[in-house]
Image: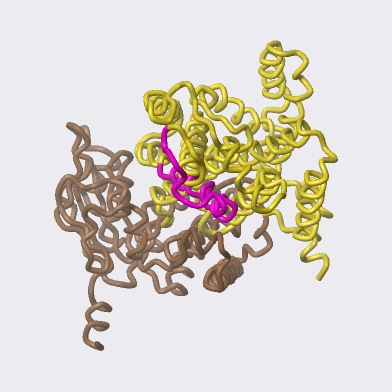
Chain colours: A yellow, B brown
Amino acid sequence: MLRRYSIQLILIACGGLLTYVAYEELLSLYTLSVLMFMGVNIILSSSLNLVNGNMGEFSCGHAGFMCVGAYVSSVLGVWLFTKDKVFGVPLLDPEWAIYAFPFIILVGGVAAAFAGLLVAIPSYKTRGDYLAIITIAANYIVISAIENLGVIGGSRGFMGMKQVISAMEDVVYLPWMPIWVFVFTIFCVWAIRRYVSSTFGKGVNAICQDEVAAEIMSVNTNKIKTVTFMVSSGLAGIGGGLFAYIIGYVNPGSFNILKSTEVMVMVYLGGMASLSGSVLSAILFTLLLEALRPLQIIKWIVVPLLLIIVMQFRPEGIMGNRELSDIFPWLKRFYRFK
Amino acid sequence: MTETVKNRESAPVLEIRNLTQQFGGLRAVSDFNVCMKPGGLIGLIGPNGAGKTTVFNLVSGFYQPTSGAILVNGVDTAGMKPHQVTGLGVARTFQNIRLWNDMSVLDNIRVAQHGKLQYGFFHAIARSAHYQTRESQIEQEARELLEVFDLQDFADEYPKNLAYGTQRKLEIARALSSKPSLLLLDEPAAGLNSSDIRELIRLVRWIHGHFDVTIWMIEHHMDVMMELCTHIKVIDFGETIAEGIPEEIRNHPAVITAYLGDEII
């Protein structure tokens, strides 16, 4: 009994500990924000791994979908619950923000999922390098569209999300952001795991390994591609929404191709199609970036260099198509990874 | 009610009318006709490049024919995607084995039942009761099928680690997992040694009896065809040049010409 629910118990304990530590301010604001970015990075890398690892396509525009989620949930939150220069008085009582917040993030995710159609529909006919070019184009379409939308600040960016958070804290004082980042991170990993381990989701792997055989063997490849791209970009949208509320400010520049590359590095570092690899590498990568912070701009020489070294000596990534349970079989007693 | 069932039983599993496929200037298949009653074991032979695989690709919905009609169990497949044609009861294997090599043998069989999952994305995420029952049914069916093919010991193995003959067998098992009424075998004996071929002949004959399926196969090994098929069709350059029982085909002058060429003197 205890063994069966051990993962759930550990997660609840972690969540509780995180809430307590953040509430009592035992951790510095800096450490806490690193932990939150870690969560966002886990969401981003595991959702991109669904497309790049499990489906074998090469998407390099993940930050574009993140951008859609970030802007939709930010604008929605600010428009509904705060007094803003552009949108005027709050539409709803700010007290409701506390209940509405998860839905605001989810709406951002849904919007990003529909933006994912921008890539999903061309993927019916295109694959490989050509689809990669389409994903880059999709990333630029999103960024340019927002840069030219003066109402939400254009390239200057958009802010006011901190007021939504403080409206929530006014009702019940709790460290809301760490809590929600934790909850959504668990939700994303959980949803991806359930998707890829179902027979329905294994169609994704079948497409990766032999698309022709998949189609002949009754897999509706167009449907699976649509669902997979929408799930992947939708989860990226959730990650983007959380990212926006953590920082309290978004601008289109922070979702450019560099950000997409960063997510891609995490996926390749972790290992293709390995969910635990993606989670692990997101954690390591976040820590690495923070550790290299004193190097300032030189950081962006060291990190790509690291990627070259990884590709040279361990091209399959840290985990390489395996889950944690393949490396540590005793973990299977607690949890089925596949 | 009984009448429709009866109609269905007597209706042809596959009916092809005046099928023509043009690739640019090349006429790969021209004016091809066939009508298959349930339960047959039919052969399709012809020299290299005769258009045999093209016919299979047309039947499985991989190409859209230039003209002509293909009816599977009485349903016109015009405009259908391959997975929809598979849903009508057509399954096939490939000339070069196309298994999903990085998926376990069991998963290969499971994914091949994608067309009749009857649940979607949200059921999979929510792990609803419907999902649980369907998933356990699918797994059970897959395991039973592996047992029938004596592959149960390899359930957790990856196909790439299996012997070539076993991979062939698995590919046929995977094709049968969707419970087809018509099974297309594209050169099942290619790359097999003579003892594997004996095994394959036994397997095909056994499948034909055990699974209530019509089999249509392409093969270059004439001994396999002569032994298995009740009826053989011969094509060359997309045109049907002969058809009949194996004995007739063996001595048919047009077939001998197609395979060995005209007499020079």
For the residue pair A43 and B144, the one nearer the viewer reads as A43
Residue B216: x and y in percent read 34, 60
B72 with respect to A95 (left or right): left
B117 with respect to A176 (left or right): left
B38 with respect to A33 (left or right): left
Name the residue located 67 percent from the left edge and 36 percent from the top edge. Answer: A271
Residue B61: x and y in percent read 30, 52
Could you tell me if residue A46 is visible in this image?
yes
Q: Quadrant of the C terminus of chain A?
A: bottom right
Depicted B171 relative to depicted A118: above or below? below
For the residue pair A174 and A9, the one nearer the viewer reads as A174
Name the residue located 39 percent from the left edge and 70 percent from the top edge. Answer: B213
Which secondary structure is most common in the magenta stretch?
Answer: helix
Q: Quadrant of the N terminus of chain A?
A: bottom right
Residue A111 inside the magenta-drawn segment? yes
Which span is picked out in magenta?
A: A86-114
Depicted A130 relative to depicted B161: above or below? above
Could you tell me if residue B159 is visible in this image?
no
Residue B40: x and y in percent read 32, 69
